[in-house]
Image: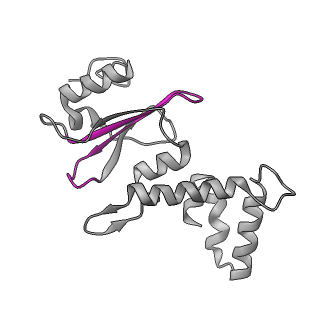
Amino acid sequence: EAPLVYLTRSDSLAVWKSGLSLTGKRQFLTTFWAARDPSPGTSRNEAREAFYQRIAEANRRFTEIGRTKVPGWRTARGRISIINGEPTDVLDRRVASGTAPPYLVWRYDRGKPRYYILADRTGFGSYQLIASNDLRETGLPGYREILGAEALQDVSRWLGLDLFQNDRGTSAN
């Protein structure tokens, strides 16, 4: 049930945590997926199958092993890929240069253009979302300082945006 939060608001899942019996949980999932079935009346629910395939792929590609193991679907990269699919383009700077930590920028051109800037501040492959133009995501207020001027210029050039401007349109220090 936990990954379903990527498909709906968490308050929609409150009933799950209200002490449902096993039968109640099965009924909840049946109803949940029936409402998202692109071809009702067939034996398959393609939306459910695709979702759980994306979960498995996120676990395969993005599981983090540090002090504690974090399944891929619970990581920032996993969440973003489950919700959005594969990025249209990737800027991969996983080898640290200068003072910047290793970072990735995922760009999506399908629908409304979106980007996600992720940085590995631990040095152990644990990429955290530090900035995005996706209003559903929360970045870090100090992401410019985390990246540093050289990396910020690299990302700005690649995205074709001026990331040196802060949210009020003035230059960042």
Q: Is residue 119 left or right of residue 7?
A: left
State the residue at coordinates (45%, 52%).
78
Q: Is residue 114 left or right of residue 39?
A: left
Report whether residue 21 is seen: no
Could you say which quadrant of the image residue 12 lies in?
bottom right
Where residue 14 sits: x, y (%)?
A: 63, 65
Q: Quadrant of the C terminus?
A: top left
Report whether residue 49 is seen: yes
State the residue at coordinates (71%, 67%).
29
Where residue 74 sits: x, y (%)?
A: 44, 59
Q: Quadrant of the N terminus?
A: bottom right
Q: Is residue 92 left or right of residue 79?
A: left
Q: Does 100 appear above or below 173?
A: below
Tell which of 42 and 97 is nearer to you.
42
Q: How is the image coloured?
A: one colour
Q: Does 138 appear above or below 22?
A: above
Q: Is residue 146 left or right of residue 55?
A: left
State the residue at coordinates (33%, 48%).
128
Q: Residue furthest left?
A: 98
Q: Does 48 appear above or below 128?
A: below
Q: Which residues are magenta?
A: 101-125
Query: Is 102 colored magenta in this rendering?
Result: yes
Q: Residue furthest right?
A: 41
Query: Is 163 colored magenta in this rendering?
Result: no
Where residue 77 sits: x, y (%)?
A: 41, 48
- How many numbered markers are drawn? 0
Where residue 123 sits: x, y (%)?
A: 20, 51
Tell which of 170 and 158 is nearer to you.
158
State the residue at coordinates (21%, 53%).
122
